[in-house]
Image (cartoon, rainbow, N blue to C red):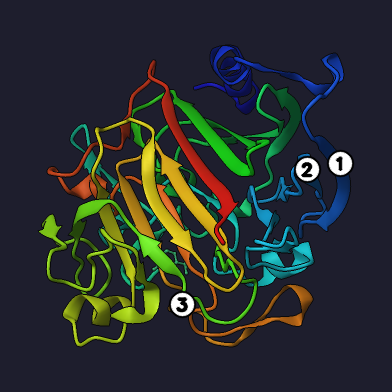
Amino acid sequence: MKTKWQMLTILTATLGALTLVGCMEVSKRPQKKGQISIKPFGQTKEGVAVDLYTLSNNKGAEVGVCNYGGLVVFLKVPDRNGRPGDVVLGYEALADYIKDSPYFGALIGRYGNRIAKGKFTLDGKECTLAVNNGPNALHGGLKGFDKVVWEPRLLASLEGPSVELRYVSKDREEGYPGNLAVAAVYTLTEDNALRIDYTAITDKATVVNLTHHSYFNLAGKGDILNHQVMLPADKFTPVDNTLIPTGELRPVDGTPFDFRTLTTIGARIGQEDEQLKFGNGYDHNWVINKPMGQLGLMARVSEPTSGRVMEVWSTEPGLQFYSGNFLDGTLKGKGGWVYQFRNGFCMEPQHYPDSPNQPNFPSVVLKPGRVYRNTIIYKFSVQK
Ligand code: GLA
């Protein structure tokens, strides 16, 4: 069994060549595109100090990334009048993220979304996970990747300023088999895109499904019901009443899940529909129409008052669109904003929920010697 440091060294050697294509450590190369500044962001309960890395570009965009939980703490992009505004929910202080956060801005892993009853079988062996969401395992367990300290490294890519976060998840952590070394590179590009490139390697067969969990509100206030959404998906994966997929890939045609043409989130969310009832709104995985592993458009969202538009691109096959149905006015966030029901939405590109138990879903198994890769891009622009 390899130690954490051996895994980090292997990760650096194996992935270094991959993540550093077009990237260099900042100290070794002057930055031309954008900037990075660093400031302390507080301490964990164990007394580990973490920092906030602010990446800024020359087009008025700025993103704050913390090496606790891989959090995106703020993301400022211009509206149609060129005024920058924060489009993600979250807190001002680390202590609030540690105390109570519904995964605001978090890096999710080892397995994004739910695994039924926290159990699956891999190579004939049953794995038992920490159960933390009713009867199921959600977002990596009791202490998922959103609650650990990541090792940061500044990079200057050809596209813009980047910060790389690395973490080694130990064999059996939260019940998952294998030491898993993970790297996530956050880049702010000159075309106002936040790009996250994830890579991972393991020393034993395991399951991996990493994603990003920002809650967006392109107006920076109020509910998200007037945001217009387009999802290029002919099918979605219906769920049971604990939000575990039934295994069916159901056509969206004629259902409130048909977002193939731009539709407001609020237009059909209140309809009498069993699936909407189970999710208390949208909290489902859409099967995106594109070839497996290919970078493609997953969602387009526009908000009429600010004029902001967000496109989501990814190499992943599915998109979890969650309409903030668990927000209930009990959390007070940045600038004193009390987050009410549906004040933010998440667009989480990933493999389908419960894939380890669903033979018909694309595989999430990672074997030793293979490299897990996933790219997620949130690209911002404006329309008149
Ligand atoms: C995901 C899940 C939701 C919910 C949120 C976090 O989007 O699908 O059911 O757990 O994360 O609150």
Callout 2 touching callout 1 (CB < 8 Å): yes
* Circle 3: residue type: Asn
- Is residue 344 shown left or right of residue 191? left
Residue 40 position within the rendered picture, expressed as x and y whole percent measured from the top left: 88, 50
Q: Which mark is residue 56?
A: 2
Q: Secondary structure at mark 1?
A: strand
Q: CA distance from mark 3 to mark 2?
A: 29 Å
Q: Is mark 3 within 8 Å of ligand 1?
A: no
State the residue at coordinates (43%, 29%): 373
State the residue at coordinates (74%, 30%): 153
Residue 254 position within the rendered picture, expressed as x and y whole percent measured from the top left: 12, 70
Residue 39 position within the rendered picture, expressed as x and y whole percent measured from the top left: 88, 48
State the residue at coordinates (78%, 76%): 335
* Circle 1: residue type: Ser
Residue behind mark 1: 37
Number of numbered markers: 3
Residue behind mark 3: 226
Residue 322 position within the rendered picture, expressed as x and y whole percent measured from the top left: 40, 67
Marked residue nearer the N-terminal end (2 or 1): 1
State the residue at coordinates (68%, 65%): 97
Which sits in the foreground, 276 or 60? 60
Nearer mark to the viewer, of 1 and 3: 3
Q: Secondary structure at mark 3?
A: loop
Q: Secondary structure at mark 2?
A: strand
Marked residue nearer the N-terminal end (3 or 2): 2
Which sits in the foreground, 290 or 11? 290
Where ligand 1 lies, by quadrant?
Answer: bottom left
Nearer mark to the viewer, of 2 and 1: 2
Which sits in the foreground, 261 or 197? 261
Dot 2 alpha-carbon crowd within 10 angstroms: few under 14, some 14 to 19, many 20 or more: many
Marked residue nearer the N-terminal end (1 or 3): 1
